[in-house]
Structures are given as structure tokens and as C-alpha cells.
Amino acid sequence: MDIIYMDNNATTRVAPEVLDAMMPYLKDFYGNASSMHSFGGSVGREIIAAREKVAALINADPGEIIFTSCGTESDSTAINAAIRSNPAKKHIITTRVEHPAIKNLYEYLAKNGYRVTWVPVDKEGVLDLDYFYSHLSEDTAIASIMWANNESGVIFPISEIAAKLRDKGIVFHSDAVQAVGKIPVDVKQVGLDMLSISGHKLHAPKGVGVLYVKKGTKFSPFMIGGHQERNRRGGTENVASIVAMGRASELVMGHLEEMDTRIRAMRDRLENGLIQNIPNALLNGKKDVRLPNTSNISFEYIEGEAILLMIDQLGICASSGSACTSGSLEPSHVLRAMGVPFTAAHGSIRFSLSTYNTEKEVDFVIENLPPIIERLRTMSPFWKEGAGRLQ
Ligand SMILES: Cc1ncc(COP(=O)(O)O)c(C=O)c1O
């Protein structure tokens, strides 16, 4: 059975070109970049080259790029650096729809002496900017606003926010893990202080991330250790993955145009095909301000988990907006923040495409999902055929 992989916001396939680029650094060139011998030195040069490629992807200076182990480490490093650099300030601000990498750290800080403001979103997942601006104060150390939401795909107005925060003495950090590689991200044009990237969301392997820190931003390391990354992140460099990150950056930069055209068109066709052919199918997220690859659809009155299990039998990989890990089938905090009713939030599925998806795969999903939804609804106590909405 062929796999139809439409879960690229969860993780992506390592691009073959990326694998080719990194393999020599696992196999042959295993030197330590800090060594005095030329064998290690040649590895150090590859790290420099990778840093330049990542910098080019977001229009940063290479010196502003710090390699980390993942998006989560980049987020933690940014937030910790901001609060440690501004110890007198005790207010921090973020959104109600951040990834757990931010959300759980802010919740931890809320229990440890910080006052946290959670900025709400509306029913389309759009950020309440008035609420945000009205809660900034002299006491605010950091604002963490994600560039694009991993579940709804909704893009936040980062440029506008950066302009508003300029010269206010508030560190502006954005978790751009879902944005970089899918839409243009230009840190110079936007003018924010810190930005997080994750390798495995853009066809590099798991285990490598990037933190951009604007030149001049007060910084203190999270990983205190060796002198690596110019004393900003201790630990012997993960050379193969850093090389991979550089190659992946080049590749996704070359695919941005395709994201905006072919992949966006394919996503729209998938979404329209499902919404038109399935009753009570509702789109989550504002239609025209989303990542071009993401579609989050609620199929009312059934469980997302049940849908995932049935499509899994056909080789289709997607994600659901509810997590049954606790056994409670609690809908995600993102859909709850958007006010998606429980009957819809439970049946939400996120499809996220990449350059490797094909029109044939989209056809397959459009053809095979409607009968699955119909079957599940016949088993649902909340759905009576012909009656449609029951409550
Ligand atoms: C928006 C966002 N931030 C952070 C992360 C965490 O990245 P990583 O898995 O590299 O730690 C993810 C991963 O899903 C994400 O979607």
C-alpha cells in the first residue's frame, strides 16, 4: 500500500538531496569542528556554509543564526534569554493558540512569578490585536507571537506587530516553525528580535533547529557549556544535521513559489472537494490568511480519531484536532480558543501538504473520504441521516 502523506505540519520527509548532503558527515567526515587538525577544520567550514544558507532563507546575517536541537529548544532559549536579560520585568505576553513549546513554558512561568497575558483569537483564528496592544506595559519583558498556527494554518500579522513593538523595550520573539519554508520570512524587513525554526518541518531531519537572534539583542545562553555557537549554545555541533539544515534551507527557498501556486491550488482543490461533497463539513481558519499547505476541516458529529483510523487503512496520514491520550477526547486548545463547538472540534482533521504530494493523491482523498464520513455518521448517536444537524 502506498502512503499518502498529508501530515507535513507534524513532520516532513527528509528530502533525498538533504540526505545526500548530510551522509558524508555521518560516515567519513566525523571530525570535531573545534579540533586544531585540518580534518576537523574542514567540518567547521561546512557549518559556516550551512549558517550562510539558513541566514539567506530568512534574510538574516550568518552571525545571527544559532543552531539548536529543535524548535522547542529555540523557543525555550528565546524566552529564557529575554526574561533573564530583563530581570526586573515580570509581565510576558503570548497568544492562546501557541504550540505547547511556548504554551507550557508560559504556564510554568505563570506559576513562577510571572504575570502572563494570553491574547485571544476570534472564531476564524485571527488574533485580537486590540487586546494585545492594550495589554502591553512598561513591565512587559517579552511578546511571543507565533508566525503561523500549526493547526489552523492562520498567519499572524508579524510585520505589523513588530512595527508596533519597536522601541518599546519589549523583546519580540516569533515561533516561525510552521512558517519558514512555506511562506517568505524576511527578518530584516519585519525587524523582530528572535525567531525559532525547526529542521524537521522543512525536510531536514529531526534533531536540528535554529534560533535567529537579531544583532544587538541582549542574550544569555540556555545551554551553558562549551564555546560553540560563539558561546551562545554549548555542545559539540550536530554537524550532519546542521549541513542538512543548510541544504534544506536552499531547497525550500527554491520551493516557495511552488508553495504559493501548485501546493496552494492542490490544497484548495482538496478542501473544496471535501467541503462540497460532505454535508456538515466546516473549515477552521480564515480562508485567505492561511499557510498555503494547510487545511483544517471539521466533520460534525463524529470523532476525528475514528476518521484517522479509517483513512489510515487506506494509507492516508493526517492529524486530528482532538487528542485521546487522556482518554477524554478533549479538543485541542487551538480549536477551543477559536470557539469551535465541541460537536465540530471533535471531528476535525488537519491535512498538511508538501512538495511531494500529487494531484492523484488529492483525487484519492476526495473520492475515499466522503463514504467513510457517511459510514461513521450512521454509527454516530448524534447524527441521524437526512436530519443533518440534531442540536
Ligand atoms: C508551531 C510550532 N512550534 C514549535 C514546534 C516544536 O518544534 P520541534 O518539534 O522541532 O521541537 C512545533 C512542532 O510541531 C510547532 O508546530
Image (cartoon, rainbow, N blue to C red):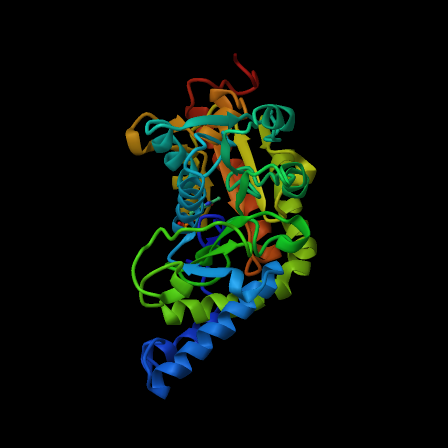
Q: Nearer the viewer, residue 172 or 123?
A: 172
Quarter holding the N terminus is bottom left
Residue 16, above or below 382: below
Residue 3 in sight from this viewpoint: no
The residue at the point 47 percent across, 21 percent down is 342
The residue at the point 32 percent across, 76 percent down is 32
Q: Nearer the viewer, residue 234 or 367?
A: 234
The residue at the point 43 percent across, 67 percent down is 242
Percent x, y for residue 47?
45, 73
The residue at the point 40 percent across, 48 percent down is 77
Q: Please give left or right for residue 12 compared with residue 257 in the image.
A: left
Residue 123 in sight from this viewpoint: yes
Residue 331, above or below 180: above
How many discs mark residues in the rendered view? Answer: 0
Percent x, y for residue 161?
64, 38
The quadrant where residue 379 appears: top left
Specify the farthest residue to the bottom: 38
Percent x, y for residue 39?
35, 86
Specify the farthest residue to the top: 391
